[in-house]
């Protein structure tokens, strides 16, 4: 049980280049699939909170969009969102990819981190993919450019050294209250999670043809009276008519598969039967339109 005097709590931001494993780490620690993973960069567009609780304390994770050089208004917004998040937290975990080594993206992030007062841990992920001898030189490279409070090599996929990471995080957090019930892992509305899950299936089933410009809006989500059945109507927005064609597929086969996979996972996640009604629409250049950003919920 929680000892009021020693209990620690706080907010921890996960930052790093796309694909370094931020979502994987949060999902591993929190133990439930709430952040979206795919092998395409920038799947995570909003702050998603994962909550870790044990008898020592509570860690509220923010899975921020990666800081990267912006190329569009949405890009600028993502960087701004990430920057703002860093000022509000108790600790920043800067994740890097041990297998890929240091890149310009990492340097860009470290430059931006210098403007932030919050302490930063360097978390070297994917150590399952590198020879141990290569690890220390890599860490030194990062250390020369930034003063980290701790350096923790891990594998988010296999869980290596993640308990050490948890211990160090908890040590860093101030004494504080339990913000969320112990069994609550996210405070995001279900609709957002549903939309992100459908987006994940789209990205998984299409390759380069459908870039992450795709957006999903859940138009309707309602539970049928007296039945364990939820009706969900969602629209997938693409930028070009050709993308709409690809997404629908021959005789609707691809869209059907997206729907099937999304539905199966939603049924597990929500513990209910799902009727999923999926539509595809074209909205040209939505990425650069403020109004649409707001409509799609990328504005807070
Ligand atoms: P994010 O963009 O930073 O959120 O990265 P993701 O969590 O989506 O991970 C990107 C890819 O890297 C996925 O295919 C993960 O399975 C993979 N990945 C994440 N962590 C590890 C790890 O520790 N080892 C290995 N081998 N792969 C990992
Ligand atoms: Mg992610
Ligand atoms: K990703």
Image (cartoon, rainbow, N blue to C red):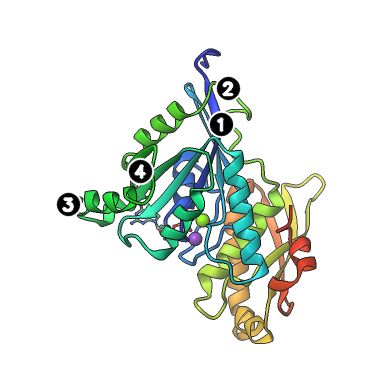
Q: Which residue is mark 3?
A: 133
Residue 172 location, x and y as percent? 46, 29
Residue pictured at 44% horizontal, 44% vertical: 28
Q: Which residue, as the protein is rendered here, is positioned at the far left?
A: 133
Does label 1 or label 2 sit earlier along the sequence?
1
When asked about the image quadrant of residue 180, the answer is top right
Does residue 224 appear to the left or right of 4 in the view shown?
right
Q: Is residue 174 above or below residue 240?
A: above
Does label 3 or label 1 sit earlier along the sequence?
1
Whereabouts is ligand 1, in terms of quadrant?
A: bottom left
State the SS at label 4.
loop
Q: Residues within 10 Å of mark 3 (few under 14, many from 20)?
A: few
Does residue 124 appear to the left or right of 115 in the view shown?
left
Q: Which residue is mark 2?
A: 176
Q: Which residue is mark 1?
A: 10
State the SS at label 3.
helix
Circle 1/circle 2 CB separation < 8 Å? yes
Residue depth check, mark 4 versus mark 2: number of the one nearer the observer: 2
Residue pictured at 69% horizontal, 49% vertical: 190
Q: Residues within 10 Å of mark 1 (few under 14, many from 20)?
A: many
Does label 3 or label 4 sit earlier along the sequence?
3
- Distance between the alpha carbons at the discs numbered 4 and 1: 22 Å
When asked about the image quadrant of residue 237, the answer is bottom right
Q: Is residue 243 above or below residue 155?
A: below
Q: Which residue is mark 4?
A: 159
Does label 3 or label 2 sit earlier along the sequence?
3
Residue depth check, mark 3 versus mark 4: number of the one nearer the observer: 3
Q: Is residue 234 something one can see in this rendering?
A: yes
- Distance between the alpha carbons at the discs numbered 3 and 2: 40 Å
Does label 4 or label 2 sit earlier along the sequence?
4
- Distance between the alpha carbons at the discs numbered 3 and 1: 35 Å
């Amino acid at each position: 049980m929680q000892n009021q005097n020693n209990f620690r709590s706080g907010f921890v931001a996960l930052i790093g280049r796309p694909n370094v494993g931020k979502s994987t780490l949060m999902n591993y620690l929190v133990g439930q699939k709430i952040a979206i993973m795919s092998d395409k960069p920038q799947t995570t567009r909003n702050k998603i909170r994962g909550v870790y609780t044990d008898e020592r304390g509570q860690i509220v994770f923010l899975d921020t969009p990666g800081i990267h050089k912006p190329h569009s208004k949405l890009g600028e917004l993502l960087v701004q969102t990430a920057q703002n998040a860093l000022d509000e937290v108790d600790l920043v975990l800067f994740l890097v990819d041990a297998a890929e080594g240091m890149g310009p993206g990492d340097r860009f992030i470290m430059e931006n981190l210098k403007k932030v007062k919050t302490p930063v841990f360097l978390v070297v992920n994917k150590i399952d993919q590198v020879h141990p001898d290569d690890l220390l030189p890599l860490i030194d490279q990062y250390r020369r450019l930034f003063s980290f409070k701790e350096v923790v090599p891990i594998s988010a996929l296999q869980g290596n050294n993640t308990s050490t990471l948890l211990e160090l995080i908890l040590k860093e957090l101030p004494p504080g209250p339990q913000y969320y019930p112990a069994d609550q892992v996210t405070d995001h509305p279900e609709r957002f999670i549903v939309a992100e899950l459908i987006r994940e299936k789209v990205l998984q089933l299409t390759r380069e043809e459908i870039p992450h410009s795709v957006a999903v809006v859940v138009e309707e989500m309602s539970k049928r009276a007296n039945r364990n059945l939820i009706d969900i109507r969602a629209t997938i927005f693409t930028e070009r008519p050709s993308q709409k064609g690809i997404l629908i597929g021959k005789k609707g086969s691809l869209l059907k598969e997206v729907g099937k996979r999304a539905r199966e996972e939603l049924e597990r996640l929500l513990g209910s039967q799902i009727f999923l009604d999926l539509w595809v629409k074209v909205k040209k250049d939505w990425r650069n339109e403020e109004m649409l950003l707001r409509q799609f919920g990328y504005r807070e």
